[in-house]
Amino acid sequence: MHYELFIARRYLFAKKSHHAINIISGISVLGVAVATMAMVVTLSVFNGFQDLVADLFTAFDAELRVTPKDGQTVSAKDKDLLWLKQSDAVEVYTPVLEGQALVVQGNRQQVVTIKGVADNITQQVHIEDILYGDGSFCLHADVLEYGVLGIQLAQQLGLSASFEDPLQVYAPKPGERVNIGNPLSSFNHDELHSPGVVFMVRQAQYDANYIVTSLQFAQRLFDREGRVSAVELKLKDGVKADKVKEQLKAQLGERFKVEDRYEQQDDVFRVMRIEKLISYLFLSFILLVACFNIIGSLSMLMIDKRQDIQTLRSLGATDAQICTIFRLEGHIICLAGALLGLVLGAVLCWVQQEYGLVSMGDNDGSFIVENYPVSVYLTDILLILVTVLAVGWLAIWYPVRYLTNKFIVHNS
């Protein structure tokens, strides 16, 4: 062990002539620990909300989604899509066709997104977990076509989970202008019946706008027979989505884009990432302020140890080595506060996960979860540790150098 580190450690734990120095050193450690703990808890709460939203989308969004980059439809028998279907990494391959349409029910109408999917959609996502009603999930039977509405859309149309009169669905014919004399002639028209259930993703973009129906119905309604607008993929167990995504991008080239669940909802998660980043920057600034307490502790220690410093200089220690001793003292205080803060933050997050000490509000069903969700990421812990050490180094380096010259060198 270098003697500078040995002496710095002794100075931290040894008794001082003034008891106040020990108290201030303890306060410095505690200040860094509290700031570190706040970073752990705050970032973990953001992670918890991100995981919560991701879980909500899991019941509706596929693990990977492949779409044409030009936003148009492609043939369901496209050679690149057929290659996807035969890939060893893909367990479930679901063709999809989406488009805008007008639905009319009585005197109410609404522009919606029709999502036509293949019958294996229940193998692709956990849509059955978000269904409400006395019926069962079904896309078609004999000559009837069924539509599963988002719960908010059903409310807007004045419908319950089960309705007797079929929905009237209209979609503009591709490439035709509206006939003023007979507007309905410019639209394709079809009907959707109720399977007795609605879905609730708890996200307005789906619950208030989407109708899930069969792929054949959507292709017929939009005059897109044999064509799809996307392909949704579920990967086999043990296959890493990120690795497969990069492989698919390389194989499909510039024609298609491949998105995971986070990229499919990029707007939502981008906002959450920005909020997390801003919180991290603010907490780093608070941490910097907390590190300034260390400077006060070191300045008092330098005054207290003047005679020891004279002894060290007489033994041959240079001014740079003396400065290093006090700088290491500051780093030890910073590291101790960081480790204590990380442990306290992790314990608080565990307590919140297990016992839900902090609730979202009154338990009246207004929130998706009753208590604040938290998720501790190892990457965040490492980032916080590096941040605390870096901020501590920046806060300590110049002040220690200045104070060493002022109290030790110039007054020796």
Image (cartoon, grey):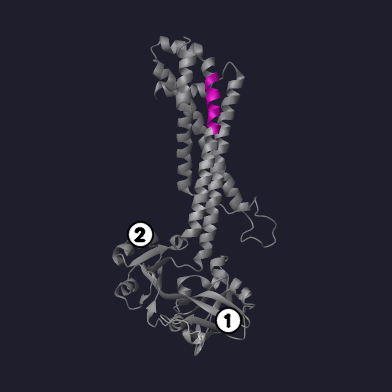
x and y, in percent, of residue 332 in the image? 48, 29
Q: Is residue 375 above or below residue 25?
A: below
Q: Residues within 10 Å of mark 1 (few under 14, many from 20)?
A: some
Q: State the extent of the magenta-drawn residues as a range.
A: 289-300
Say whether residue 168 is visible: yes
Q: Quadrant of residue 200?
A: bottom right
Q: Residues within 10 Å of mark 2 (few under 14, many from 20)?
A: few
* Mark 1 and mark 2: Cα distance apart in space: 44 Å
x and y, in percent, of residue 383 in the image? 46, 43
Identity, as a three-letter code, of the amino acid under mark 1: Val
Is residue 297 in the magenta section? yes
Q: Quadrant of residue 26?
A: top right
Which of disc 2 and disc 1 is earlier in sequence?
A: 1
In the rendered image, which residue does mark 2 sit on? 243
In the rendered image, which residue does mark 1 sit on? 104
What secondary structure is found at the residue carrying circle 2? helix
x and y, in percent, of residue 264 in the image? 45, 63
Q: Quadrant of residue 246?
A: bottom left
x and y, in percent, of residue 406 in the image? 48, 15
Is residue 171 in the magenta section? no
Q: Nearer the viewer, residue 95 or 126?
A: 95
